[in-house]
Amino acid sequence: MSAVLPVVRTVADLRAQVRAWRAAGLRVGFVPTMGALHEGHLSLVRLARSKADRVVASIFVNPTQFAPHEDFEAYPRDEAGDMAQLASAGCDLVFAPAVAEMYPPGAATTVTVTGVTDAMDGIARPSHFPGVATVVTKLLNQCGPDVAVFGEKDFQQLQVIRRLTADLDIPVEIVGAPTARAADGLALSSRNAYLSADERKVAVRLNEVLRDVLDRLRRGEPVEATEQHAIADLQAAGFTRIDYVETRTPDTLARLGPGPVTGPLRILAAAHIGRTRLIDNMGD
Ligand code: PAF
């Protein structure tokens, strides 16, 4: 019988465990999640495991990164299922705080990152990155890991986290993990659970269109026309709203184009199918 994965629900208990590991000379890895775990999250845990002696995962559906009209209440939750998966991936401890533990009455501080948040999801979801930056700052301060792993699927989020840890002198190595994909290329996401069978067939076009954009740009086609072409392709495929398809530098997320580009780039996209919003990105 496999051992039960320990869960702590308070910052004090989390700190006590991490302090004990530190005292024993162990290196600590951390994987923050909002639960509803899939293979993508487990790949983050395995990567953390390869870089640390002990791995902590957090499960916290952070209310401050959802706008009032978004899916906070409906966001999938399955703590028992998540725990079983985390145990099998080599996680040592789960931090699963209640909202009141993370945001006690009187909490009044928000972390705001500028620059990398000035476009794309920073515009489409204006309250999102302040919520993410605040909770990630808190989680890193609470856990105090040596290394923390975040998925490249949320590419803009990853750059926000790199920026804030550098700016706030948080002593942690931030590692980005490649996007885990289904066999047909769809980026794994907890929100894929919202898709009907017909919508799932539309969803796969997002990564195919991004691949096409990358191929076109590498053939020297101009950025702006290629992005417009991609938006038309997504609309034709059945996406009901396209928030953006944008070509950016990978690190600072500065706009590239409108003409042809050479050198490092990342294409980022967000699009809706009915009530489900999907994001994906691609680089080479
Ligand atoms: O990527 C996520 O799941 C969340 O944005 C994170 C980093 C766990 C913060 O709530």
Image (cartoon, rainbow, N blue to C red):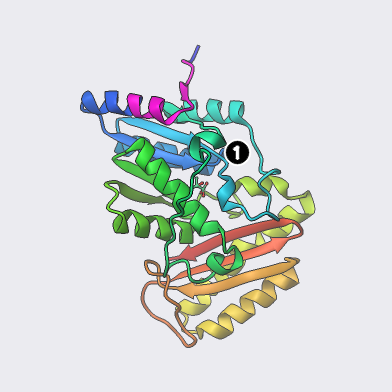
Outermost residue, front direction? 106
Q: Relative to residue 277, is residue 87 drawn left or right? A: left
Which x, y percent locates residue 267?
A: 50, 69
Magenta span includes 231: no
The residue located at (77%, 59%) in the rendering is 274
The residue located at (26%, 33%) in the rendering is 27
108 vs 191, nearest the viewer: 108
The residue located at (58%, 78%) in the rendering is 227
One can see residue 39 in this view: yes
Which x, y percent locates residue 25?
A: 20, 27
Mark 1, secondary structure of its residue: loop
Q: Which quadrant of the view contains residue 38?
A: top right
Q: Which quadrant of the view contains residue 23?
A: top left
Which x, y percent locates residue 190?
A: 61, 45
Does the residue tagged 1 have its C-beta within 8 Å of any atom of ligand 1?
A: no
The residue located at (61%, 54%) in the rendering is 186
The answer to whether 264 is drawn above or below residue 138 in the figure is below
Residue wearing tag 1: 36
Q: Which residues are magenta?
A: 3-16
223 vs 279, nearest the viewer: 279
Which x, y percent locates residue 182?
A: 59, 48
Tell me the crowding category of disc 1: few under 14, some 14 to 19, or many 20 or more residues within 10 angstroms, Cα based: some
